[in-house]
Amino acid sequence: QDLNADRAALLSLRSAVGGRTFRWNIKQTSPCNWAGVKCENNRVTILRLPGVALSGNIPEDLSNSSNLRHLYLQGNRFSGEIPQVLFSLTNLVRLNLASNSFTGEISSDFTNLRRLKTLFLENNKLSGSIPDLDLALVQFNVSNNLLNGSIPRNLQNFKSDSFLQTSLCGKPLKICPDEVTVPSQPTSGGNRTPPTVEGSMEKKNKNKLSGGAIAGIVIGCVVGFALIALILMVLCRKKGNQRSRAVDSSTIKQQEVVVSGDKAGGEAAENGNVYSVSAAAAAAMTGNGKAGEVNGPATKKLVFFGNASKVFDLEDLLRASAEVLGKGTFGTAYKAVLDGMTAVAVKRLKDVMMADKEFREKIELVGAMDHENLVPLRAYYFSRDEKLLVYDFMPMGSLSALLHGNRGAGRTPLTWNLRSRIALGAARGLDYLHSQGTLTSHGNVKSSNILFTKSHDAKVSDFGLSQLVGSSATTSNRATGYRAPEVTDPKRVSQKGDVYSFGVVLLELITGKAPSNSVMNEEGVDLPRWVKSVEKDEWRREVFDSELLSLATEEEEMMAEMVQLGIECTSQHPDMRPEMSEVVRKMENLRLSSGLDQVDEAD
Ligand SMILES: Nc1ncnc2c1ncn2[C@@H]1O[C@H](COP(=O)(O)OP(=O)(O)OP(=O)(O)O)[C@@H](O)[C@H]1O
C-alpha cells in the first residue's frame, strides 16, 4: 500500500460522502496538497474535514489509508451507526466524530484502535451503555448523547464535562442506583443496560457470603494492613536517604549552573552566545555523574508524546550545546542542538507547585494537542527539582521579534500578504485549541508566543502553561497589554479571553505597535483603546503601520476590515467578542476576496 492507494481511498470517500464540498484539485497526482490532507513519509496521515456538510456512508476502501493517524470529521451530517471501516484504521491516534447524527451503540471494536488517545463522540445520538474500552485514552467526550448505564472504570478519571447531557451514572457523575436491589430492566429499542462485571461480582458475593468467607476477609484485611505498614516503613527510610543525599555537592553544583545560566540569559540571547549545559549540569542532574543515583532510574527519563520514536534522551539533552533564547513568564528557554543536528527548544519551568500526578495529567493534555499551527510539545521531564519541556525549535523567531526587532536600515519590510497570513495561521491554531473542548484555552496569547517555521508559517506556542505554574509567574507585566479586562486571575483563562488577546495581536500586526509600549505612549492608553479612539477615515494615516503605505486598494480595504475585526475581538464585554472559528472564517474570506488566496479547484 502506498500513496496511490491513499489517493484512491480519498477519491472514493469524496464521491461517497462529499461531492463538491471537497475543494480538491484531483488533477494533482499527489493528494498531499489537497485541503485538509497531510502526509508524512509519502503516506496520508491526517485527514481534516470538519464542518463541511458531509453525509452518506464512509466507504470500505478508506481502510487502504492504513497510515491515517488523525481523522477529524466533526460537525458534519453523518448518520447511522459509526462505520465499521473506522475500526480497521489501527494507526488512528485521534478520532473526532463529534457533532454529527450517529446512532446505535458505541462498539467495543473501538478497542481495535490500540493507539487511540483522543476520542470525541459528543453531540450525536448514540445510545446504550459505554463498553469497557481497554484503551489508554487521554481525551474523551461523549456528552450530549442518549447514553445510559454506568461509566466504565477506566473512563472514570475523566472530568464530568466528558459525560454531560447523558443518562450515564457513576464516577465522575452521581452514583448509580444500587444495581443489586434494582435488577436491570430491558428497555424498548434494545437499549439495555448490561450489568457491569463489577456489579455482577458484587451480586454473587452478596448472595453467598458464608461464615468462612467472612473469616477469610478478616484475615486478609489484617495481612493487607501489615503489608501496607511494611511498605510505608521502607518508603520512609528511602526518602530519608534521598534527602540526605540531595544536599550533596553535586546538587549544589546543579543550582549554580542553573543560576549562572539564568543570569547569562538576557545578554547571552542578545549576543547569540553559545555555551554548554554539558558536563556539570548533566553530572548534577544525574547525581554524581552516575545516572540513577539520586532519584532512581525510573525518574531519569524524558517522556515523549505521540508515536514519534525516541531520538534522544535526557543525557543527550543535557550534554547538548545550549544557547539562551530568553527568559519568559514560566522560566528560561534554551536552544539545544543534539548531535550537532537536531535543534530543540527546552523550557525550564519555574514555580511549578504541583504534585507529580497532577502535572503529568495536565501536560499529557498539552502534549495531545496536534495542529499545523501549534508548536508541538515533544517531550517533558519531571522531577522534584527540575521540570523541562521540549519543543520543536522554530528557526525564524517570534512575531514580536519580526515586528519590533529591527526597525532600522536593513529591515525587510513585512508585506500585508505576510502579516495577514500570519494572523490567519495563528487564528487557526487557536481555533483548533478551542475546538478541543469548551474549557480548553491558551491563556497567554501574545506576539512572542507566535513563532515561525522556515517558510514563515505561524505556529502558536506556550499553550496550557498558565495552568501549570504558580501565580507569581503569571502576574508578569508583560502579559498585561494582551490580557482581557475581565481576567483578573491569570490562571483562570477562558476562550473569550484568548479572543481578546488575539485581537490585540491583530492590532499589533496592523499598527506595528507593541501593546506593552503603547501603555507608556503619550496617549497613555492601551493599544485597543487607542485604535478605537481614532476616526475611521483617519485609520489609513494614523493606524496602519507606515511600512505598509504602498498598498493596493483591495489590500487597504482588507486592512480596514481587519482593524474592525481587531476592535470586535477586543470588545470590553466577553459576549460581544466573536468565537475563534468565526474569526478564522472571516479572515479566510477576506484573503480570498482580496485575491491573496485562491479557491482550490473543485475538479
Ligand atoms: N520552540 C521555540 N523555538 C524557537 N524559539 C523559541 C521557542 N520557544 C520560545 N522561543 C523563544 O524563546 C524566548 C523565550 O520564550 P518564552 O516562551 O520562554 O518567553 P516569552 O514568550 O517571552 O514569554 P512567556 O513565557 O510569557 O510566553 C522568546 O524569544 C521566544 O521567541
Image: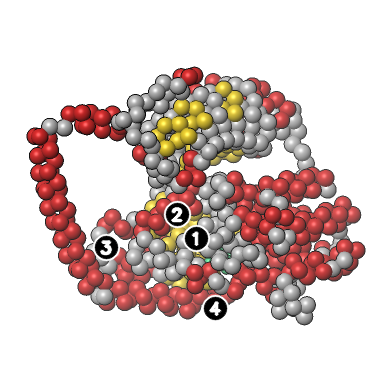
The crowd level at tag 1 (other Cα within 10 Å; few <14, some 14-19, many 20+) is many
Ligand number 1: quarter of image: bottom right
**Residue for point 43% across, 43% down:** 173
Name the quadrant containing residue 206: top left
Q: Position of residue 272 (x, y in %)?
A: 55, 72
Q: Is residue 268 above or below residue 71?
A: below
Q: Nearer the viewer, residue 36 or 443?
A: 443
Give yes or no for contact between labels 1 and 2 (Cβ–Cβ under 8 Å): yes
Which residue is under mark 4?
267
Query: Residues under labels 1 and 2: Cα distance?
Result: 8 Å
Q: Secondary structure at mark 2?
A: helix
Q: Amino acid at mark 1?
A: Gln
Is tag 2's residue or tag 3's residue first in the polypeptide sequence?
3
The type of residue carrying mark 2 is Lys
Location of residue 578 with respect to 478 vertically, above or below? above
Of the two numbered discs 4 and 1 on the same chain, state the one appearing first in sequence: 4
The kind of residue tagged 3 is: Asn
Q: Which residue is mark 1?
A: 467
How far across and down, in percent of the image, does residue 128 sit? 46, 27
Percent position of residue 212, x then y: 9, 34
The disc label shown at residue 295, or none: 3
Question: 499 and 64: which one is in front?
Answer: 499
Which residue carries the number 2 mark? Answer: 362
Q: CA distance from mark 3 to mark 4?
A: 34 Å
- The residue at the point 30 percent across, 31 percent down is 180
Q: Which is nearer the N-term, disc 1 or disc 3?
A: 3
Label 4 SS: helix
Tell me the residue at 28%/73% (across/down): 250
Pick whichever of labels 1 and 2 is earlier in the sequence: 2
Asked if the residue under mark 1 is in contact with the one under mark 4, i.e. CB atoms within 8 Å, the reply is no
